Amino acid sequence: LAKRGGRLEGLKVFAADLAEKEQEKIEKTGAKLIARAEPEYPLLLAELEDAPPLITVLGHADLLSKPALGVVGARNASLTGRKIAEDFSRKVSAAGYIIVSGLARGIDAAAHAASLGTGTVAVVAGGIDVIYPPENKKLYEEIAGQGAIVAESPFGTEPIARFFPKRNRVISGLSLGVLIVEAAMKLGSLITARMAAEQNREVFAVPGSPLDPRAEGTNKLIQDGAHMALTADDVIRELNSLRL
């Protein structure tokens, strides 16, 4: 199959002893591996053609199978943007939806912090044990205790640039829809929005001033057909309709 797909090199089977050592490390951290074929694997994520064959989960794995909203946006978010992310995340989470984000600075961190008590999931680009950015260590620990951390990369993997788009597809893959709060035209959040649309997920965007570069991406998403989200109720109403 690999050769028919154009792969020139042969496939290498991962050594059993190395797999056992990695599993031991994962279990020592309190996390666990969940395979795509197992009942615990989230159904929405499993629908994706390129769903991860294995995910590592630290915390409450049952949250991954509950209805969710992805919330992403600028790392260099404005104070207003962070407040909007907090307000929407708090209210949408209180309405019965898990908030999924990427543990990044700015919008991601605000969304996680606002939904800690009601359910939040952080999808990380590196290994389950690698905290990035380092300043979010306390938030990481709080999410691990009250929510869930999800990683596709092997244990100990340091996050590099090319891993983040893969991380983004998991954020949208776990969610019924994705909300974008502040995004410049070339920001990773727009990659998440594109992936969400390709996965047949709803895309919501908070509009902003045309003079603010951080609103260029969200305003363009609305022009291209994304749901304009002025209040959390706009998002909740649409998500509720998907569950009828």
Image (cartoon, rainbow, N blue to C red):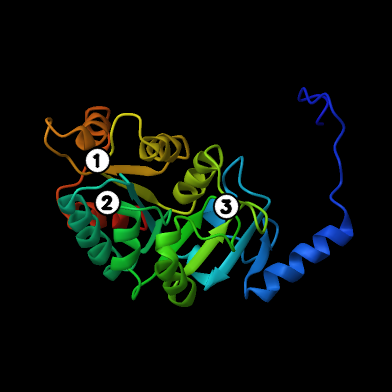
Tell which tag, 3 or 1, sits nearer the viewer. 3
| Residue at the disc numbered 3 | 126
Tell which tag, 1 or 2, sits nearer the viewer. 1
Callout 2 amino acid:
Glu
Can you see residue 67?
A: no
Q: Nearer the viewer, residue 197 or 179?
A: 179
Query: Tag 2: Cα neighbours inside 10 Å, few (<14), some, or many (≥20)?
Result: some
| Residue 71, horizontal then vertical, whole percent | 34, 52
CA gap between label 1 and label 2 equals 9 Å
Q: Quadrant of residue 214?
A: top left
Q: Earlier in the sequence, mark 3 or mark 2?
A: 3
| Residue at the disc numbered 1 | 227
Q: Secondary structure at mark 2?
A: helix
CA gap between label 3 and label 2 equals 32 Å
Residue placed at 40% from the left, 61% from the top? 135
Q: Secondary structure at mark 1?
A: strand
Q: Are marks 1 and 2 in contact (CB under 8 Å)?
A: yes
Q: Are marks 3 and 2 in contact (CB under 8 Å)?
A: no
Residue placed at 27% from the left, 61% from the top? 89
Can you see residue 212?
A: yes
Q: Secondary structure at mark 3?
A: loop
The quadrant of the picture occupied by the C terminus is bottom left
| Residue at the disc numbered 2 | 238
Q: Earlier in the sequence, mark 1 or mark 2?
A: 1
The quadrant of the picture occupied by the N terminus is top right
Left or right: 228, with 175 as reference point: left
The single residue placed furthest to the front in the displayed view is: 134
| Residue 216, horizontal then vertical, whole percent | 22, 31
Residue placed at 22% from the left, 28% from the top? 223
Q: Are marks 3 and 1 in contact (CB under 8 Å)?
A: no
